[in-house]
Each structure stands twice: as C-alpha cells, then as structure tokens.
Image (cartoon, helix red, strand yellow):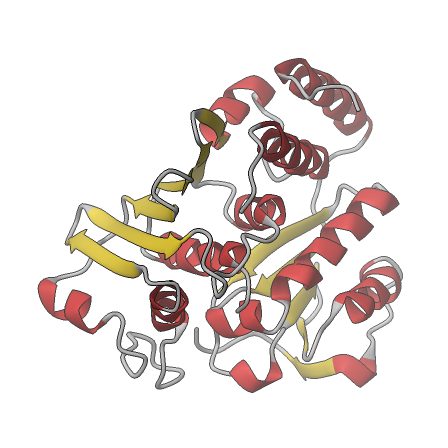
Amino acid sequence: MLELALHILDIAENSTRAGARHVYIHLNEDREHDLLNLEITDDGVGMDKESLAKAVDPFYTTKKVRRVGLGLPMLAQAAEMTGGELILTSEPGKGTRLKVTFGLGHIDRQPLGDAAGVMVTLIAGNPDIDFTYCHDHGDQSYLLSTEEIKKEIEDVPINHVEVLKYIRNHIAEGLKEIGSEA
Amino acid sequence: MAKITIEDLKKIKERVHAETALRDGHLRVKVTVHMGTCGIASGAKEVMDALLKEIEEAGVTDVAITTSGCMGLCSREPLVTVEILNQDPIKYEYMNSNKMRQVFKRHILEGEIQNPFVLARGAETQK
C-alpha cells in the first residue's frame, strides 16, 4: 500500500468490523514540527491487553481464513520509515484509538492520496456507521460529518449515488481550500 | 466551480424524492467489493471508484453497493460479488476498473455473466 488514504481505508474497515457506530478520522499537517499526525478512533468492541500487544505482529490475526494480518504492521512500517511511530490504545467494550505520526517532509513519507475516494468507499459500504473526517493544515481546518449530512437529507440514504458524489466533491474542494499539501 | 454548500444537499434530497416517487425503489442487484487489506493493496478502491462512476453515469437506482472483509482468497483479489435478486451470487476474481466496467454493463445491467472473470458461483461459506 503506497498511499496513506488506503491505510486509512484499511484501518477504518477494521473499526467497522469491530462493531463501531462512529469512526473518527483526524489528520493534522503540522508544518511547525514537520509532522503529519493521523488519529483514528472508534467505539467498537476494543481489545484486551493481550490482543493489543500482538496487534502489530504480522503473524497475528483473529481471522480463521488466513494466518497473517498485515494491515497494522504495514502502517507501522510506513510510519517508522519516516521517523514516526504507531501507538495503539484500546479498552474492551469502549473502543480503540490509533495514533500514527509521520515525518511530514520526509522523503519516504507516503502521499495522502485519494482521501475523498476512500471516505466515499467507507460511507458507501457502511451507511449505518457515522464517519467524521477532520483535516487540519496549519490554522485551517476541514470537517466532514456524515451525521450532519444525514440530518439534511432525511430519508434519502447516505449511500445514494448523488449524495456520494456530493461528499466526494465536498472533500476534494475542502482539502484544496485549506491548502492541504499532504 | 461554484462552492459546494449545504443547499446542494437539499437540492439532492428534492431531486431524489421526485425520482423515487416514480419508482417503487426496490433493489435488484447487490454488489460487494471485498475490502480487506489484501483487496485494498491490490486495487479494490479503484474497482469501487469505477463501479460508483458507472452507477452514476447509468443513472440506475436499483443497485446497492457494499464492502466486506477478506475471505481468505487474498491471492485472487480484488474480488467482487454480484448478486442479482433470485439468482446465485457470482464472484469475480482479479478485478480492475476495466473489468468492473464490463461486468457492470454486461452482467449487472444486461444479466449476462462474464465467465472469463468468474471465480465461483454460490454464497460464501465463511468470512
């Protein structure tokens, strides 16, 4: 995986499978400290200490259909390559929080990629889950909340093609407006 | 391009209401794009993008899209399952945006199964 957006998609899909009702995605381009911070928080089933310790082990998985679980290890590697790190915290019954830092200007940092497409994919596949996408760049900030969109569109499903198109354009325009350079 | 505002959502709502009033709004097809780590790494998002674009261009409202996790056939990803109402689900392997467009036009719209891309018929037994 060569784009951060794809990692976000992968991790957020984990949250949806953990039974989350709300997934919060926060990106922060911190020019001052030359850091890119990514935070994904969910209110899913969470993990106990034992699973948490093994979660970044590529040979640990809870699935029965294969013997490897590469999602988190690949993200950890992408972060470590840029001098950053991945911190996972979780509490059973409460949810999981993932914090990843990257060296923003590091030559090995993966580009953000198609964040709009990723959010659309997440929302299309999981219409019942509420997603919040927040992206900070310096003192400017972009926010998308499916909860708010759902209030506006009332009985129109959020995964209706027209609404998805709106969301895609909204994110693309929003990120351009805050001058995202990731 | 004009700035996208909340007003646009209201317009979408009104337009969708007007459209669905004419139809009974039943879903005819369910398309599942498998979005495990393996699927994503091999291009499932591009497949999803192509599918959404096709649906948008064709203006169909009876096709539902969903995502699922890895089912253990990582080497054959990206996988797409097409389920037409009252028919066996068809699983397509090694998908890409071109194949997705073909499957959409021929199978989803016209009902003609695209045999060269088919991995299996029938439902998943485990997930």
**Horizontal side, residue A42 vs residue B34: left or right:** left
Residue at image point 54% right, 52% down? A112
Camera-side residue of A174 and A49: A174
Residue at image point 33% right, 51% down? A19
Residue B105, image x, y percentages: 87, 61
Residue A171, image x, y percentages: 60, 35
**Horizontal side, residue A181 vs residue B23: left or right:** left
Residue A49, image x, y percentages: 10, 64
Residue at image point 76% right, 41% down? B61
Camera-side residue of B64 and A168: A168
Residue at image point 50% right, 47% down? A126
How many marks the image carries: the answer is: 0
Camera-side residue of A96 and B27: A96
**Horizontal side, residue A92 vs residue B49: left or right:** left
Residue B120, image x, y percentages: 66, 83
Q: Is residue B32 above or below residue B11?
A: below
Residue situated furthest left in the rendering: A49
Camera-side residue of A20 and A24: A24
Q: Is residue A172 above or below residue A139?
A: below
